[in-house]
Amino acid sequence: MPPDTLILRQPDDWHTHLRDDDMLRAVVGHSARQFARAIVMPNLRPPITTIAAAQAYRQRIQAAAGTTAFTPLMTAYLTDDIAADEIARGFEQGVFTACKLYPANATTHSERGVTAIAKIHRVLERMQTLGMPLLIHGEVTDADIDIFDREAVFIERVLSPLLSDFPALKVVLEHITTDDAVQFVSAAAANVAATITPHHLVISRNALFAGGIRPHLYCLPVLKRERHRLSLRRAATSGNPKFFLGTDSAPHARDAKESACGCAGIFNAPMALESYATVFEQESALPRLEGFASEFGPRFYGLQLNPRKVRLRRTPQPVPERIGELVPFHAGQTLGWLFEGVIDA
Ligand code: DOR
Ligand code: ZN
């Protein structure tokens, strides 16, 4: 029998959306409760493209979190005309931890994203020299490419050539959803890694249509076939340091989800560790959770491991239908683990 108590080095979330204003205040505590640090996505309106905007946003996050125990790690939103100097200065000053590449119009608030990689060649050159990570939303945007193929086609048409041009660039392929991505990242050099969300480990595209359309399970990249989910589970629980935790928690107001044109994003921050722990237990891989959740990410980013620990207990954990105005991932279900908190050990 596996132990009933799990003590881990405190994890970090290497990909999350904290939003701003009222939504920020509603959600940040959920991330700050479980994670020591989080890579904060810059897809606000307007997007975070300057050092000053990132500093101001970081302060708003810290004020809303109300604790110094949570460190937001800021990212710069790449646009066609962003200046390499601003990126480099932001990295050197410790304001930007990484840059985020959204192909233009790939997802929520990505309309100012990059229209062609050639537009940002000078920026990528500087990042490669600095050792600054590039975080990629890996989907092509062509309407004629089937939505379920957009990640695989991105890897072939965009990522592969990008890595040939910048072989030493640190790249994180974010929220991977396909076996194609697992294979690509596994075979790539050590400077290429990937984050994996709880939802892509737990559900396949069938869940989107189980008994009717399920807007709270719609996210981008969209859920894929079962065989891809199984491949992601093998990758996450394999102990391969190229794969690490990134929730992609992406809250939207309930009426924006339950709509004729519902927004993409799953709000999973409240139960993130419980969700991952349940997956690792199902895969008989609990001893490998700590690497995935707490070690491989910081090592990839060149950051210290967190000194503190967290405790989870194996006990039924009902997930509420609503948390405030938001519908969380696993709403109405019961998870096998309870996050008890940060402990001094
Ligand atoms: O589902 C998603 N939601 N995918 C993204 O890439 C963006 C995110 C959001 O910001 O809502
Ligand atoms: Zn995201």
Image (spheres, rainbow, N blue to C red):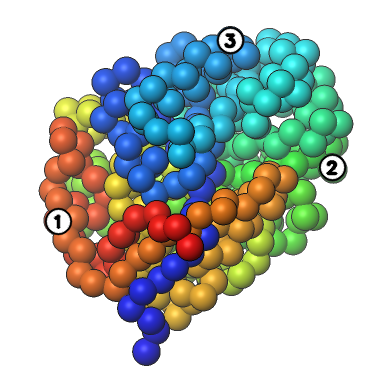
Badge count: 3
C-alpha distance separating marks 1 and 2 = 45 Å
Residue 148, position as x, y percentages in the image: 46, 48
- SS label for mark 1: loop
Relative side of 188 to 241, left or right: right
- Mark 2 crowdedness (10 Å alpha carbons): few <14, some 14-19, many ≥20: some
Residue 206 appears in the figure: no
Residue 7 appears in the figure: yes
Q: Nearer the viewer, residue 194 or 225?
A: 194
Q: Residue at x 30, y 53 (%)?
A: 271
Kind of residue at badge 3: Ala
Quickly name the residue at label 3: 52
Quickly name the residue at label 1: 332
Q: Which image quarter: residue 274?
A: bottom left
Quickly name the residue at label 2: 168
Q: Quick check: 6 above or below 194? A: below
Q: Nearer the viewer, residue 26 or 263?
A: 26
